[in-house]
């Protein structure tokens, strides 16, 4: 099947992608991911289903799924697509963004009597699970059918926007994850594309009764921060080839008036870098564990001395 959205055409059979008519060098597994999400929409694709489908008979880390999603988002951003691509649904898996589904058009194959793709005059357009046949618009009855279809599409889109907006409201009554200890002092969201680098620090926070939740990219961090309340955000500086990813995440938060305390945990920041972080709304830059604990622990009414794991 061929699908068009934005200036892309995706062939899910040949695993071929073009942007503005130019072939895109994409990993086959990235295109298989999109095919899987198209096939399962509007349902979410669980992380386990994704691993079993894209890495059959292979033992891989669960981080592989998150990395693949992150790399796929980056691929399309690099080719000019700035809209939502793949949603991360906390505890459920991944799903195509509804905004993308609105643009998604299913195209017929290549015409035999012309050198131009039939995509220039598609017979059937599929959007958000609805099919509309333009050739049927030659009669009043067909016009009514088209209007009814568009009405259903608008209702479907409105429902998605409504539930997305209501689920995005922070609510202390909604548990962050099933199984969180009932007596935690608070929550930290830690954003780092190499989370194993911070195991020691995370365990020390957890030893003080602070729950630590990990994400590996800015998009997932923004989604979780819109859904749940955190007492602090700790971020690395560079992620996924973007040297200022941590700084940009901080600016995103402050731009939407989110005043969650924000700390950068990075290597050898310069003094101008520290000053710039503070000027743009950051709460501090830490290089060592002791610096990090001295900045973050007072938020939880704990002694600023570095904790130790028993």
Image (tube, helix red, strand yellow):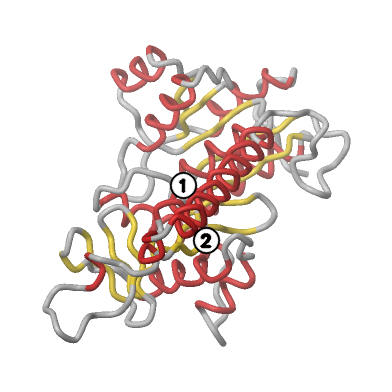
In the rendering, at what x and y percent does residue 182 appear? 88, 37
Q: Give the left or right position of residue 105, taking residue 141 as reference.
A: left
Q: Quadrant of the N terminus?
A: bottom left
Q: How many numbered discs?
A: 2
Task: Say the numbered circle drawn on residue 53.
Answer: none
Residue at 45% over, 62% down: 132
Few, some or many C-alpha atoms within 10 Å of disc 2 (few <14, some 14-19, many ≥20)? few
Depth check: give the residue in front, 83 or 58.
83
Nearest to N terminus: mark 2 or mark 1: 1
In the rendering, at what x and y percent does residue 232 appear? 61, 27
Few, some or many C-alpha atoms within 10 Å of disc 1 (few <14, some 14-19, many ≥20)? some
Q: Mark 1 points at which residue?
A: 99
Q: In this view, does 61 lie above or below 69?
A: below
Please tell me whether mark 1 sits on a helix, a strand or a loop: helix
Please tell me whether mark 2 sits on a helix, a strand or a loop: strand
In the rendering, at what x and y percent does residue 198 appear? 55, 46
Query: Picture quarter containing residue 300?
Result: top right
Q: Mark 2 points at which residue?
A: 130
Q: Give the left or right position of residue 113, taking residue 51 as reference.
A: left
Q: In this view, does 20 lie above or below 206?
A: below
In the rendering, at what x and y percent does residue 6 appear? 30, 52
* Residue 197 appears in the rendering: no
Depth check: give the residue in front, 287 or 145.
145
- Foreground disc of the pair 2, 1: 2
Residue at 40% over, 63% down: 125
Residue at 58% over, 68% down: 40
* Residue 17 appears in the rendering: yes
Residue at 56% over, 17% down: 259
Determine the CA span between mark 2 and mark 1: 15 Å
Q: Give the left or right position of residue 300, taking residue 24 as reference.
A: right
């Amino acid at each position: 099947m061929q699908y068009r959205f934005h200036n892309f055409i995706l062939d899910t059979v040949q695993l071929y992608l073009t942007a503005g008519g130019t072939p895109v060098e994409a990993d086959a597994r990235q295109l298989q991911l999109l095919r899987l999400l198209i096939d399962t929409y509007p349902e979410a694709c669980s992380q386990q289903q994704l691993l079993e489908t894209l890495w059959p008979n292979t033992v891989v880390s669960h981080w592989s799924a998150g990395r693949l999603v992150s790399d796929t988002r980056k691929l399309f951003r690099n080719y000019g697509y700035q809209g939502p691509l793949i949603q991360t649904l906390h505890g459920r898996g991944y799903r195509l963004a509804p905004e993308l589904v609105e643009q998604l058009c299913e195209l017929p194959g290549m015409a035999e009597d012309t050198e131009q793709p039939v995509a220039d005059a598609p017979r059937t357009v599929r959007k958000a699970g609805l099919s509309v046949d333009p050739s049927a618009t030659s009669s009043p009855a067909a016009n009514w059918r088209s209007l009814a279809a568009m009405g259903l599409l608008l209702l479907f889109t409105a429902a998605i926007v409504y539930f997305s907006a209501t689920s995005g409201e922070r609510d202390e009554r909604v548990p962050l994850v099933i199984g969180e200890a009932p007596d935690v002092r608070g929550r930290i969201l830690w954003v780092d594309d190499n989370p194993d680098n911070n195991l020691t620090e995370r365990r020390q926070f957890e030893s003080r009764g602070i729950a630590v939740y990990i994400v590996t990219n800015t998009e997932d961090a923004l989604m979780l921060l819109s859904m749940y309340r955190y007492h602090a955000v700790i971020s690395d500086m560079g992620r996924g080839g973007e040297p200022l990813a941590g700084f940009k995440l901080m600016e995103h938060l402050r731009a939407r008036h989110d005043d969650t305390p924000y700390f950068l945990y990075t290597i050898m920041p310069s003094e101008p870098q520290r000053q710039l972080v503070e000027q743009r709304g950051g709460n501090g830059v830490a290089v060592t564990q002791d610096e990090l604990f001295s900045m973050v622990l007072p938020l939880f009414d704990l002694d600023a001395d570095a904790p130790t794991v028993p």
